[in-house]
Image: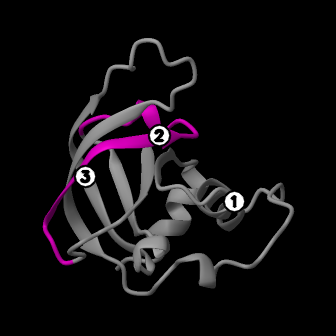
Amino acid sequence: MAFAIKAPIADPGAEVFEFPAHRTMYGGKRIAAGDRLFLFASERAGGRGLFARGIVTGAEPLPRTPGVARQTPRVHLRVRRTALAVRPLGRAELPRRSDWSDGSPAAEIDFKFYRQGTDKIVGLSDAAAAFLDGFFR
């Protein structure tokens, strides 16, 4: 399965990335070593959106905090970069929409990452992963 992460990225040119205690949504908690991951540099932290693709080399779910009723599952993630994007894809490149139900891969990305601005790991459909693959050689 393919996943995507939106996070603050200090060094987009790095070969290896580590994301401690990163929140998951939309199936992101099922991420595991060997999965394909698309990396988005969070625009809220000065990034420009999709910049790389990688392979998950380690994924450990973190235990829930006792006594807290509502918790977003979190994962400690390690990723090895395999490719750099050849063109940008961020909020500015996606069409503005208020209806995310058209079924397009762009609508899926927009909904999962930009409807709610939090940084997160999300699961992707095959169509969304194929769409994102188009940003790489």
Please name the residue shown 66% across and 78% down the image. Answer: 94
Callouts 1 and 2 close, C-beta under 8 Å: no
Question: Could you tell me which quadrant the N terminus lies in?
Answer: top left
Residue 23's spot in the image, x, y percent?
43, 42
Q: Marks 1 and 3, how far apart in space?
A: 26 Å
Front one among 133 and 46:
46
For the record, the magenta segment spans 13-33
Q: Quadrant of residue 107?
A: bottom right
Q: Quadrant of residue 136?
A: bottom left
Please name the residue shown 85% across and 66% down the image. Answer: 98
Q: Amino acid at mark 2?
A: Thr
Outermost bottom residue: 87
Q: Of marks 3 and 2, which one's residue comes earlier in the chain?
A: 2
The relative height of residue 124 versus residue 134 in the rendered view (above or below) is above
Residue picked out by circle 3: 55
Residue picked out by circle 1: 115
- Under circle 2, the secondary element is strand
* Magenta stretch encompasses residue 102: no
Please name the residue shown 61% across and 61% down the image. Answer: 109
Disc 1 vs disc 3: which is toward the camera?
1
Neighbor class of circle 2 (other Cα within 10 Å; few <14, some 14-19, many 20+) is many
Residue picked out by circle 2: 24
Residue 89's spot in the image, x, y percent?
52, 79
Please name the residue shown 38% across and 19% down the image. Answer: 65
